[in-house]
Amino acid sequence: MLLVGTALAGCGSGGPGGSDDDSLDVWVYQDASTKVQREVVKRFNKTSDVKVKLTQVPGDGYSDKMRTSMGTPNAPDVFFNWGGGSISDFVKKGMLLDLDPAMAEDPELKKAFIPTILDAGAIDGKHYGIPMRGMQPVILFYNKNVFADAGAKPPKSWDDLLKLIDTFKSAGVTPFALAGTDAWTEQMWVEYLVDRYGGAGVFQKVRSRGMAAWDDPAVLKTARTIRDLVGRGAFGKNYKSVNYTADGASTLFAKGKAAMHLMGSWEYANQKANQPAFAKSGLGWTTFPAVPGGSGDPKSVVGNPTNYWSVNAKVKGEKRKAALEFVKFAAGQDYSKDLIANGDIPATSDAASLLGGHENPGYARFQYQLVERAPDFTLSWDQALPAKYTPPLYTAIQKLFNGQLDPDGFVDALKGM
């Protein structure tokens, strides 16, 4: 962190658009995908008089660094973010460039991305982000070997799912791996159930009208369903002590101790890194089923649509033109090919023709079609809402799963955030 702090202290000399620094300061979250951004910077700098300086910020400190830097002379000119709540405060303070005029001037830019993903990064109907990484829907994964041993098939309906709980319990296998120490993994269940019971509009009302909008019948139905699943033993007896960050849930799943795992699409890469044989031949995937009486479209998905480039509103003149040209590089096929080579699935509308280059084309096409066909892609609640709501949201979800809140208490807890 000392090295990172030193690097950042020298960034943005003179502030965004400052006359004493003709380069663009671009921040990116540092992880295995950063190499894609390093390559695009090299390509861009070969074509532009205004050069990009890429600052790679370690993930543990990224969000804090982003929040504390904006509005200061050391703020980035262009930066990586999650859309939604991660940038909503910046938008309210007029710190980000509205990208709609640039899209109006260049209609092909807007057409270059899957609409639901582009719109997921919007705030109050205006676009402040350009998709720049792979899509990350939440997927219902299953262990092919465990299913074969039980003579079972992936669930196509909620009734199928409930029957599978009994099937795997009888076989001594936990039906669903769940990392109960990490509330965001439990949140995925709540998000999908609310979407299936009431549709994407339920959470959209929360974002637009405030916490009182949690008082929707779909939320209460979801809470009751969660308690029913826990009572049926869907997550086993020890889920409260299982983690995700230390690979606890994924290892149980890969080793056949659990039959299914509801997780973000990155689970494939995670399994490939830690249990490569399982990722190659034992990992299966399917969609989250509809629920009885639900009004939500079963083709809708939840998760992190992608990550976005946003531009600091203080960037002016030639630097602003260069910033816009830089973020447009994310729409190009060279960039998409780099993402695919890295194991990611691009959010561009023409990526389908490139997916044969993915290391697992079948998985890549499933994921791409899942998102492409989705009428709505709901951003993860902890990313969509302002950061202040994350702790009480996590607490309420964990208490619901752990039996410390009944369904009505859960709804009251959300309304009181």
Image (spheres, rainbow, N blue to C red):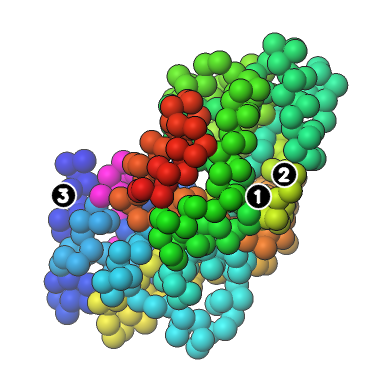
Mark drawn on residue 197: 1
Mark before the other along the chain sequence, 1 or 2: 1
User: Helix, strand or loop at disc 3?
Assistant: helix
In the rendered view, does 274 fall on the left or right side of 376? left
Q: Nearer the viewer, residue 125 or 233?
A: 233
Q: Is residue 64 above or below residue 396?
A: below
**Residue tagged by mark 2?**
291
- Taking the spot 56% from the left edge, 15% from the top edge, the residue there is 237
- Confirm whether the magenta stretch covers residue 50: no
Residue type pointed to by label 3: Thr
Q: Are marks 3 and 2 in contact (CB under 8 Å)?
A: no
Mark drawn on residue 400: none
Q: Is residue 17 above or below residue 156?
A: below
Q: CA distance from mark 1 to mark 2?
A: 7 Å
Q: Specify whether residue 15 is in view.
A: yes
Tell me which corner region of the image, top left, top right, bottom left or bottom right, holds residue 198.
bottom right
In the rendered view, does 214 fall on the left or right side of 269? left
Point out the frontmost of discs 3 and 1. 1
Mark before the other along the chain sequence, 3 or 2: 3
Question: Where residue 73 sits in the image (x, y, percent)?
Answer: 15, 67
Q: Specify whether residue 354 is in view.
A: no
Q: Tag count in the figure? A: 3
- Taking the spot 59% from the left edge, 36% from the top edge, the residue there is 224
**Residue tagged by mark 3?**
6
- Taking the spot 43% from the left edge, 27% from the top edge, the residue there is 404
> In the rendered structure, which segment of residues is drawn in magenta?
52-64
Q: Nearer the viewer, residue 55 or 411?
A: 411
